[in-house]
Image: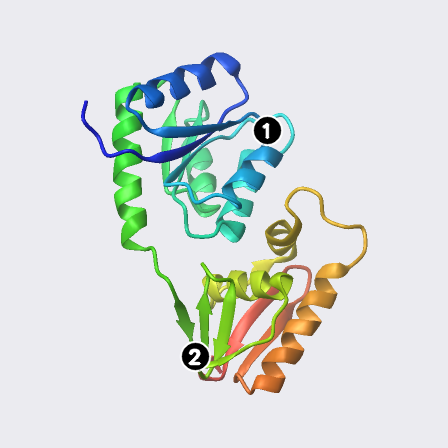
Amino acid sequence: MNRNALTILVVEDHPTIARQIVDFLDGLRWQTDHAATGALAIELATRDPYDVVLLDLNLPDIDGLEVCRAIKARAPRNVPVLMLTARDAFEDKARGFNEGADDYLTKPFDLRELALRCEALARRGQLHVSQSMRLGALTLLPREKRALCGGAPLPLTLACFKVLLALCTAHPQAVSRSALMHALWGANPPDSDALKSHVYALRRQLELAGAGTTIVTIPQLGYRLELADDV
């Protein structure tokens, strides 16, 4: 098979299944990385730009749905996630899609179909790759990890930028505290309430810049970005 090379992260804790997938994709001359735990998957997916993440739901340390949320919140771009699982009930699939999955393949599966789905997801993902995101007066440059307000740079720490990126991506929906904490610290958040401090600092910078943007606290859930046009 003559295919364009893709970069794939295989997240699978079963060694035999992982080896079968990796060997097959390597045979296509694709670049593959393997993670047997959710923590390693989050670390790799938020550090390196993959074309597709193949994500098993049953992982030994973190539930696959949590891993999906973290990758979607923290990855340098909106990498497509293909969930691999033996759970085939509609409710399981619905939960997967609701947590951000882009496709769903139940075990056992044909490796040739897996490759076709990866190619389709990669093409779709490339259509949505953007070097900038605009929301009201704000412009975010995810690849550069910078933000502008009315064209002027916003002096944000990396942590504040990650919070702002998650809020802008989810707008007008809220982002849970757990998702924001994953975006900042992965599976090992600090014991202190550092998230609140970063949100406060981000609020302050948006106010000083006159962004016309408010971070609203949603009790017992998290935070939501509110623009002047939203009210």
The colour mode here is rainbow
Element under disc 2:
loop
Q: Crowding at label 1, few (<14), some or many (≥20) Cα neighbours within 10 Å?
A: many
Element under disc 1:
loop
Residue 116 in picture, x, y percent from top left:
25, 30
In the current view of this chain or complex, which residue is farthest to the right?
192
Count the numbered circles shown: 2
Q: Amino acid at mark 1?
A: Thr
Q: Is residue 101 above or below residue 211?
A: above
Q: Is residue 183 above or below residue 43?
A: below
Question: What residue lies at 66% left-to-right and 42% top-to-bottom?
Answer: 187
Question: What residue lies at 38% left-to-right and 43% top-to-bottom?
Answer: 80
The reply, left or right, for residue 211 in relation to residue 1 is: right
The reply, left or right, for residue 127 in relation to residue 204 is: left
Question: What residue lies at 45% left-to-right and 58% top-to-bottom?
Answer: 143
Residue 44 in picture, x, y percent from top left:
53, 38
Looking at this view, is 96 or 38 the one in front? 38
Residue at the spot of label 1: 37
Q: Amino acid at mark 2?
A: Gly
Q: In the drawing, what numbered circle is on residue 10?
A: none
The reply, left or right, for residue 92 in relation to residue 155 is: left
Residue at the spot of label 2: 136
Q: Crowding at label 2, few (<14), some or many (≥20) Cα neighbours within 10 Å?
A: some
State which tag comes first along the sequence, 1 or 2.
1
Residue 142 in picture, x, y percent from top left:
46, 61
Alpha carbon of mark 1 to alpha carbon of mark 2: how far?
Answer: 39 Å
Q: Is residue 163 above or below residue 153?
A: above
Residue 231 in picture, x, y percent from top left:
49, 83
Image marks 1 and 2: residues in contact by CB distance under 8 Å: no
Residue 221 occupies quadrant: bottom right
Identify the image quadrant of the N terminus: top left
